[in-house]
Amino acid sequence: METQLNYVSLVRDRHSTRSYELHPLTDADRKDIAQAIASAVPLTATSLLDWRLADKSIMGCSAVLYAECGSSADELIDYGYQGQQIVLALLAREWGTCWYYQVRLPGSPCSITVGRPATPGLRSAVVGALSRGHTRKTIEQVVPEGMLQDSAALVRTVLESARLAPSAMNRQPWTFKVISPNQIVVQGNTGRFPDLGICLANAMVTARQLAGAATVTRLDTGEYSVSWQDTRLRKD
């Protein structure tokens, strides 16, 4: 299912759910959530996290998703990278989610609330609209060196998905550099949050959807390359 998801739309439609229906999880729900978890790929082959569901109700959610994770910058980035892929897969299944930094279950830097979204009132609709990009930095702010003159639409779409990533306290601690029509570099300061990994996940799934394949490579602490080849354009 995940290979067919429209990640571009999911990234743009995603917002933090802060009001949930009263919905105890059924066995079918748990299987559905497990499939979303299984769709996530780690940054390295040895860093796949053991994501778990805790039956806790925060803001009325059905459960809380978390994994044990170390506190190094690389580990936090991978936590956000895997977690955001799960968030988008859950959204495609009509689950509401919210990255929740105030609750840290054993060994985790933060949690993800999961549940069926309640019918939004006026206030939550306004908050949702704001969270979908109107409070984000502009593309000019996050690409300080500017775009390449011949930057393709694919590059711009990947950058837009990265720009829309959520972050703790809306810090948006990243900048982007366009290296070529097939590569961008993401730089940022993680601190004690998995924000940079969330941003990388948005960029990766967008590039993978539009180009057919994408690679994320660590260049240095807090610096990663996202690259792709337009495999879907070469039919001959």
Image (spheres, rainbow, N blue to C red):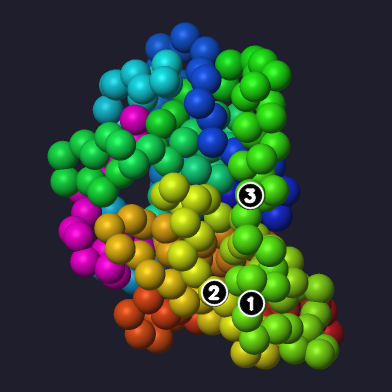
Residue 71's place in the image compared with 17, above or below, is: below
Tag 1 secondary structure: loop
Residue at the spot x=66%, y=44% of the render?
132
Residue 227 locus on image (x, y percent): 58, 80
Amino acid on which the number 1 mark rests in the picture:
Val
Amino acid on which the number 2 mark rests in the picture:
Thr
* Cα–Cα gap, marks 1 and 3: 17 Å
The disc, 1 or 2, on the residue closer to the chain's N-terminal end is 1
Locate the N terminus by quadrant.
top right
Locate the C terminus by quadrant.
bottom right
Residue at the spot x=54%, y=30% of the render?
17
Packing grade of label 1 (10 A; few <14, some 14-19, many >=20) is: some
104 vs 124, left or right, is left
Residue 27 is drawn in which quadrant?
top left
Tag 2 secondary structure: strand
Question: Is residue 137 in view?
Answer: yes
59 vs 105, left or right, is right
Q: Which residue is mark 2?
A: 175
- Magenta region, residue range: 64-77
**Which numbered marker is on residue 143?**
1
The disc, 3 or 2, on the residue closer to the chain's N-terminal end is 3
209 vs 57, left or right, is right
Q: Which residue is mark 3?
A: 135
